[in-house]
Amino acid sequence: MLLVTVALLVLLLTSADTPPAEQTRGRYTQALDQLYLNMPSIIGCNTSLTIESMLNSSPRSVKQWGRNLEQEFSFIIDEPKNKYTLLTADYTSRFIRLAVLSKIAVPHSATRESKKPLVVFIHGLATNPDRAFEGPRLDYLNNIGHRLASNDFIVVVPFIYNDLRWNSLANSLYPVLELNVAAIQASIDLMLHEFPVDEDKIVLYGISEGADIARRVASLDERIDLVVLNGRHNDPTGFLLDQGIDTANIDPTAFSDKDPCSSSILAEYKEIKVPIILEYGGDDQQDFNLEKTVELLGEKDLEVVRYKGGHAINPDNETINLIKKRLGQ
């Protein structure tokens, strides 16, 4: 049942003179400010805020948390589209009571008797969930939320906390990543509880920093059935190499629960037990090591979708069609 809080409706009415994009940007900024209030301003690699240090439990126990969602949440119906309804959702993760803001698209054909696959789309830097539904050339998301919802997927696009200050020394784990893991898991909980989602068809689809988050969630959460990753296939990470940091001492196969700095992208790939689709824009400079990664992951159920483009979501529906095929749609 969709609940619309009076407070949020009043907020909409009293801010009628403010353009919708500015309203949304302001809410995302407030959420980011909340994050910084909960974390120290400087964290070194050896003292990263992992789930272990914040909750006194192993990072590998995330999948055992059970319900990650606080019971307080609300929805606003934005507008009905041709094939789906678009909502804005506010909810709270139990992980330090982190506020999560999302766009949700529900196809008109989705009912309790006709459940639909869920795609959790995870964006990267310099964008927000609105952009996934606002046109094919607005930014690197290429209207992916709209295209997925138009193809009969229920879609949730959570706002991703991101700030390069936090990962300049990290390899595959860093504080903001762990907070985003919690936000994604709370989003999955919400979608399973409130919407007609087929719980056997849950897809993570991430680009850039969102691919880092998707890969991490997929290595921890047993509810995931398929992972699509775009723009983060390097090992060691492109970020470290771009910054000219010496990576000679990074073991590309090491994974450590105790020291986040000793883990690597390849090691995290190896933790994923479900099929993986790698999207690859041929001109994407962040994917220079893709082929080597694919070679090292040879035993995995893995497919690569190559397309003409750079660091952006595939503008063609080839990847969407492959997702449907892998889910038996």
Image (tube, rainbow, N blue to C red):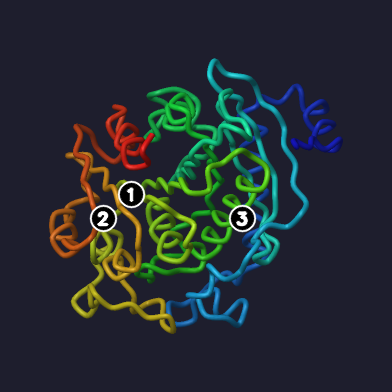
Type of amino acid at the residue the image marks with label 1: Leu
**Residue 317: percent from the left, percent from the top?**
31, 28
Q: Which residue is drawn at the image coordinates 53% and 19% (left, top)?
A: 83
> Residue 300: which quarter of the image?
bottom left
**Residue 129: percent from the left, percent from the top?**
53, 38
- Mark 1 crowdedness (10 Å alpha carbons): few <14, some 14-19, many ≥20: many
Query: In this rendering, which labeled residue sits more in front, label 2 or label 3?
Result: 3
Q: Do the residues bearing badges 2 and 1 touch, measured as CB atoms within 8 Å?
A: yes
Q: Which residue matches tag 2?
A: 233
Marker disc for residue 186 = 3
| Between 33 and 322, the one nearer to me in the picture | 322
Q: Which residue is drawn at the image coordinates 38% and 58% (left, top)?
A: 215
Type of amino acid at the residue the image marks with label 3: Ala
- Mark 2 crowdedness (10 Å alpha carbons): few <14, some 14-19, many ≥20: many
Type of amino acid at the residue the image marks with label 2: His
**SS for dot 1:** strand
